Image (cartoon, grey):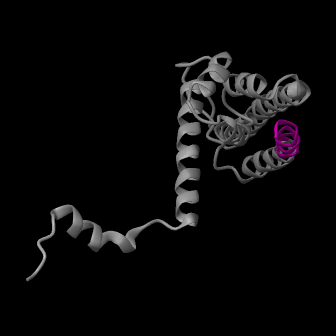
Amino acid sequence: MAEIKSTIELVMERTKHLVQTPEERARANEQELESRAAGYLLKITEGHIQPEELPDLLDRTGEDAGPLRKTLLGLMIRGVGLSGDNEPILAGLRTLAGAAVDDEIAEIRELSAAWAGGMKKLTGDAGGQVIEELAAKGITGSAVKPKYASDPAYIEAREKLARDLGGKLDRVRAVILGKAS
């Protein structure tokens, strides 16, 4: 006589080949860590949590906070840029990595200031050049607004500035990563 099986037994029989491999489990765990760390970083940048609260928040996760901390540090290091507001991220880096990265944080601030100054100079120079070119064609007046963003000389100068300062920022990121690990 045939055996009558429960629904659970039938489901288990049909899905026994769908078990995750160790590599798939590790990848899923890594993606979960990235997602959680990205959530913390977003909350920091939006001001929902203060960087000083991070150690307590990480300790309250109920698990080993080391991997999450390391992932969050990596995201913070990658999240620092030349433009934009880096202060919440830098404060978070200082909180998690400690005083060992103070010099690098100061250097990132200098690079951001150099980027802002360089861009201000570039836009002023490019705008002035466009106005001069228009004036040479007889186009003048207070309503003339230069559109230099598509000017090849401006684009080239901007890319050079980004390469120069971006290379320095990458070196600083590598130093922070080495010190924070």
Quadrant of image for the C terminus = top right
Above or below 26: residue 138:
above
Q: Is residue 144 visible?
A: no
Question: Residue, x 62% and y 28% (percent of image)?
Answer: 58
Identify the image quadrant of residue 16. Answer: bottom left
Magenta stretch prevailing secondary structure: helix
Image-based side of 148 in relation to 14, left or right: right
Magenta segment: does it hold 174? Answer: yes
Quadrant of image for the N terminus = bottom left
**Can you give x and y, in whole percent of width and height, for residue 89 in the image?**
69, 28
Above or below 80: residue 28:
below
**Can you give x and y, in whole percent of width and height, for residue 73 in the image?**
71, 37
Magenta segment: does it hold 115? Answer: no
Viewer-side residue, 33 vs 46: 33
Question: Residue, x 67% and y 22% (percent of image)?
Answer: 55
Viewer-side residue, 172 vs 69: 69
Above or below 46: residue 171:
below
Question: Residue, x 60% and y 32% (percent of image)?
Answer: 41
Above or below 45: residue 161:
below
Where are the magenta residues, as a range?
Answer: 169-181
Identify the image quadrant of residue 50. Answer: top right
Name, please, the residue furthest toward the left.
Answer: 1
